[in-house]
Image (cartoon, rainbow, N blue to C red):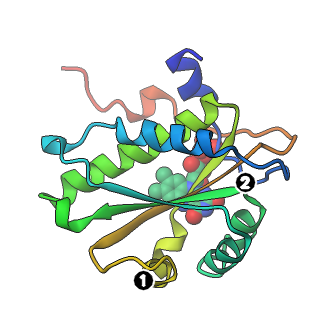
Amino acid sequence: MDIFEGIHTRRSIRQFTEKPVARDQLIEIIKAGTWAPSGRNNQPWRFVVVTGAEVKKNLAKHTKYNFIIEGAQACIAVFADRSAMYSDVKDHQAMGACIQNMLLAAHALGLGAVWLGEILKKADGVRSLLGLPQEMELMAVVALGQPAPGEHTSQRKDVSEVLLKEL
Ligand SMILES: Cc1cc2nc3c(=O)[nH]c(=O)nc-3n(C[C@H](O)[C@H](O)[C@H](O)COP(=O)(O)O)c2cc1C
């Protein structure tokens, strides 16, 4: 898939079929995340893959978007390792780039994915559910699966609305 085609056709997918996602594909998605740029190339990202029904059910309890997690075949919880960070802003920017790479990789593999941020309200609960130490800061949960049939549309402001100046 051409990179521009991927950027323009990726949509947040919130409904999935029951077909499982292969472990190889999950690893491929994580690998794409790790190829994001990061300040000083410090690569602060860490990942937890959740495919087990019981853990998935418990993870879902931490967000009002529980139905998305319950319906997903896999979730990848994405953490910033605070012990590897050097600048709050720059490291969080790198984490955003990592997550976007993951979404684009999932799309390129023909999978559907959505970036779940609302779950950050219960970040402590997620961290303890997954048995991680305090320095792991939850950035997002990416829910994944084969996209259920249906049309997915989205909109963007025109460039003319967001381009402030050309000097
Ligand atoms: C930081 C962030 C947090 C988000 N949190 C959620 C969420 O909790 N639940 C959800 O359904 N979508 C979430 N999304 C997805 C956005 O709703 C979605 O990207 C936006 O509506 C544009 O749609 P599109 O991705 O299909 O183009 C989040 C996206 C970002 C970048």
- State the image quarter where residue 68 is shown: bottom right
- Pick whichever, 167 or 104, lies toward us: 104
Q: Which mark is residue 14?
A: 2
Q: In this view of the protein, can residue 156 be seen by the observer?
A: no
* Quadrant of the rendered image containing residue 10: top right
The amino acid beneath tag 2 is: Arg
Mark 1 residue crowding within 10 angstroms, few (<14) / some (14–19) / many (20+): some
Q: Give the percent coordinates (x, y) of residue 79.
A: 38, 62
Element type where label 2 sits in the image? loop
Q: Is residue 131 visible?
A: yes
At 52% across and 43% down in the image, what residue appears? Answer: 27
In the image, residue 54 above or below residue 112: below
Label 2 CB sits under 8 Å from any ligand 1 atom: yes
Q: Secondary structure at mark 1?
A: helix
Where's residue 45, x and y in %? 33, 54
Q: Residue furthest top?
A: 2
Residue drawn where x is 64% and y is 75% of the image: 55
N-terminal label among 2 and 1: 2
- Asked if disc 1 is less than 8 Å from ligand 1, the answer is no
Ligand 1 occupies quarter: bottom right
Position of the C terminus, as image quadrant, is top left
Which residue does the image show at 26% across and 54% down from the upper left?
44
Mark 2 surroundings within 10 Å by alpha-carbon count, few (fewer than 14), some (14 through 19), many (20 or more): many
Q: Quadrant of the N terminus?
A: top right
Circle 1 residue: 124
